């Protein structure tokens, strides 16, 4: 039976990267609980991201602020049981142009970049975790770019609700509009049209 936060992490590491139990235990000392209050940040814009987080509780948004217009643009929503990081900053040690904000009171298990780097030469399984994490974020970016190019706002909305069935209860319509790349009145029209279908 799943009891503590490390047990939940182990279950998802096994599913995510097929890590054996011994390799997961090898890293247990490096993962620690981090609590982030609603509207606080996992990382700050133009700072180097030094952690990978596993979301135990809460929802995050990844967004950037257009320096010309000062408008916010939501890129992703990251819910429970997903890994959270700024991959570019993690890989290159350069500053991250994005902000990662908790939309709810959140709890994570986090591992520092330096500790993760220590695990790679000690375990092929942890190397595989790093590769799969990078592949996942590459796919996130690819799918996001393709959806903005090839899908209508209505299609993007349908996909979002199918992938996150409870998102309308957890994320404001303003944030959802920003993610879809439309204004609030357009989202209201899409929701009204779908309600009549």
Image: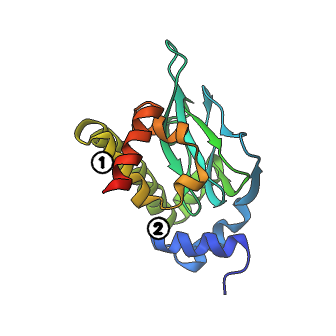
Q: In the image, is residue 67 above or below residue 2? A: above
Other-residue count near label 1 (Cα within 10 Å), few / some / many at <14 / 14–19 / ≥20: few
For residue 37, above or below residue 19: above
Q: Is residue 150 left or right of residue 16?
A: left
Do the residues under discs 2 and 1 have CB atoms within 8 angstroms? no
- Eye-nearest disc, 2 or 1: 1
Quadrant of the drawing holding the N terminus: bottom right
Mark 1 residue element: helix
Residue 176 placement (x, y as % from top left): 49, 42
Residue at point 30%, 48% (across, down) = 155
- Reply above or below: 55 against 39: below
Residue furthest bottom in the image:
1
Q: Is residue 109 visible?
A: yes
**Badge 2 element:** helix
Residue 97 in sight here: no
* The quadrant where residue 62 appears: top right
Q: Could you say which disc has been placed on residue 155 in the image?
A: 1
Q: Residue at x 65, y 46 (%)?
A: 103
Query: Which mark, by number, is residue 69?
Result: none
Q: CA distance from mark 2 to mark 1?
A: 28 Å
Which residue is farthest left?
150
Figure disc tally = 2
First of labels 2, 1 by sequence position: 2
Colour mode of the rendering: rainbow
- Taking the image as shown, residue 23 lies to the left or right of residue 2, namely left
At 51% from the left edge and 74% from the top edge, which residue is drawn? 14
Instruction: Check residue 16 in the rendering and tell me which mark sits there, or answer none.
Output: 2
Nearer to me, 64 or 121? 64
When asked about the image quadrant of residue 70, the answer is: top right
């Amino acid at each position: 039976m799943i009891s503590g936060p490390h047990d939940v992490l182990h279950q998802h590491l096994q599913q995510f990267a097929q890590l054996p139990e011994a390799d997961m235990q090898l890293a247990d000392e490096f993962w620690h609980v981090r609590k982030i209050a609603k509207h606080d940040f996992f990382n700050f814009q133009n700072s180097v991201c030094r952690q990978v987080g596993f979301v135990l509780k809460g929802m995050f948004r990844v967004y950037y602020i257009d320096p010309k217009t000062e408008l916010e643009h939501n890129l992703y929503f990251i819910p429970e049981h997903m890994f959270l990081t700024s991959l570019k900053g993690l890989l290159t040690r350069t500053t991250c142009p994005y902000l990662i904000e908790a939309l709810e009171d959140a709890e994570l298990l986090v591992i520092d970049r330096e500790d993760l780097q220590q695990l790679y030469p000690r375990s092929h399984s942890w190397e595989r975790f790093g590769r799969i994490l990078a592949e996942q974020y590459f796919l996130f970016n690819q799918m996001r770019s393709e959806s903005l190019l090839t899908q209508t706002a209505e299609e993007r909305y349908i996909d979002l609700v199918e992938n996150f069935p409870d998102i309308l209860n957890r994320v404001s319509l303003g944030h959802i509009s920003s993610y879809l790349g439309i204004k609030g009145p357009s989202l209201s029209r899409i929701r009204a049209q779908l309600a009549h279908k």
